[in-house]
Image (spheres, rainbow, N blue to C red):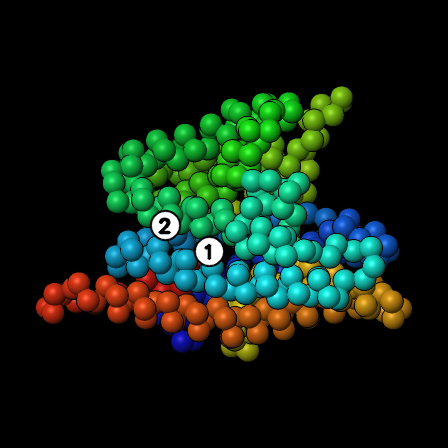
Amino acid sequence: MSASSGNRRISWDLVRGGCVVLVLLYHATFMSVVVHPELGPRRFVFPHQIGASLLLVISAYFAAVTIGRGSLGRYWWGRIARLLPAFLAAVVVIYFALRYLSPPGWFSPRFGDLVGNLLMLWNWKPADYPFLDGSHWTIPLQLMAFTVAALLYRGSWGHGRKFRVLMWTVLLVPLAQWPLRVAGPPEWYRVIVDGFGFHRWHLFVAGIAVWLWTNKRVRTIEFVLLEVLCVTAHALHGAAVTPAGIDVEWGSTLGIATGIAVLSLAAAGPDWNRFLPSFAQRAITWFAGVSYGVFLIHQAIGYLVLHWLSGLGVDPLLQTAGMIATGIVLGWALTRLVERPAHRFLMRGYDAWTARGRPDDEPAPVSAGKPG
């Protein structure tokens, strides 16, 4: 399929791929030195956590786009089949890389750490279950969001006025409890709030609001107000309370606001294929196709690459390029060897299983396509 044929739009490939590039730059130039200061300063630093958050906004938008296509069961299983196998495979690969290739003094995971990461327990008890790869914090939030979306869509709370009331509630309740969150709450409160990702819900609201607005389900004034509050919630999420007041990380806040505006343009406007030559479209589409794999496997192994290149005296800019190139190659391999074949296998299994109980004259379900 070409970049502009069918339902595929080069604008969304560019946006999705651009967000993953921001994640790569953030980890390679900033977080790498935060986690491993012995790597030394970088010549170029991108210190803003923007890309992963915007990927959640995109996921929420495409959840709204695809949930009405085909059966709800197939929609939900399709999201699980797309996200979970590649994640599990990436965790195993990263575990063995860190276990046997980490230099002295670096984190060397035990078998219990592998189990905790496969079960995605870090958001619940981060002190007991350290991340093998910090990028993975988005995965359980997406799985929970897709599950909640399917359950809501089955009933009246997933439609119409009730759904809009629910969206405002999901946005305002975490905002209202923010003072308690930063005031040193009890551990049981932190476990619940972080485990269910209350402080990230605004990102899903932001994506769904874009879909509602582009489909004329909400007026522009309500859409703008929703997005302003989403950006406010994100600013507070990353803010620190100091004796001088609330210290907001304005770079990330403005980045999220700009990103939501760009996503809105991609959703509401024409495809951007007219502005890009064919060779650029092919490259963008290819990278977007492997971007989930790149996202899953680039960070922890990439830090090892930085360590090895640093030991060889390689320039910091070339170290960054080496980490990014390694992440892209490994992400491509993960996509080709695990994500795509596992998705095809699991969807064929689901279709075969549901076909057993379907009358002969009932049509097979229509594929909802790949989500954002």
Looking at the picture, does residue 231 appear above or below residue 32? Answer: above
Quadrant where the C terminus sits is bottom left
Percent of width and height locating residue 246 = 69, 26
Q: Which mark is drawn over residue 266? A: 1
User: In the rendered structure, which amino acid carries the disc numbered 1?
Assistant: Ala
Percent of width and height locating residue 307 = 81, 63
Looking at the picture, does residue 317 appear above or below residue 64? Answer: below
Q: Residue at x 53, y 61 (%)?
A: 88
Asked if one can make out residue 272 in the rendered structure from this viewpoint, the answer is: no
Question: Which residue position is annotated with label 2?
Answer: 64
Asked if one can make out residue 48 in the rendered structure from this viewpoint, the answer is: yes
Quadrant where the N terminus sits is bottom left
Structural crowding at the residue carrying mark 2, measured as other residues with C-alpha within 10 Å and reported as few (<14), some (14–19) or many (≥20): some
Residue placed furthest toward the bottom: 279
Q: Is residue 253 left or right of residue 345?
A: right
Percent of width and height locating residue 86 = 51, 64
Q: Residue at x 86, y 54 (%)?
A: 38
Comparing labels 2 and 1, the label whose residue is closer to the camera = 2
Taking depth in this image into account, of 85 and 231 the one nearest to the observer is 85
Q: Is residue 269 left or right of residue 349?
A: right
Structural crowding at the residue carrying mark 1, measured as other residues with C-alpha within 10 Å and reported as few (<14), some (14–19) or many (≥20): some
Taking depth in this image into account, of 95 and 63 the one nearest to the observer is 95
Q: Secondary structure at mark 1?
A: helix
Percent of width and height locating residue 135 = 61, 53
Q: Secondary structure at mark 2?
A: helix
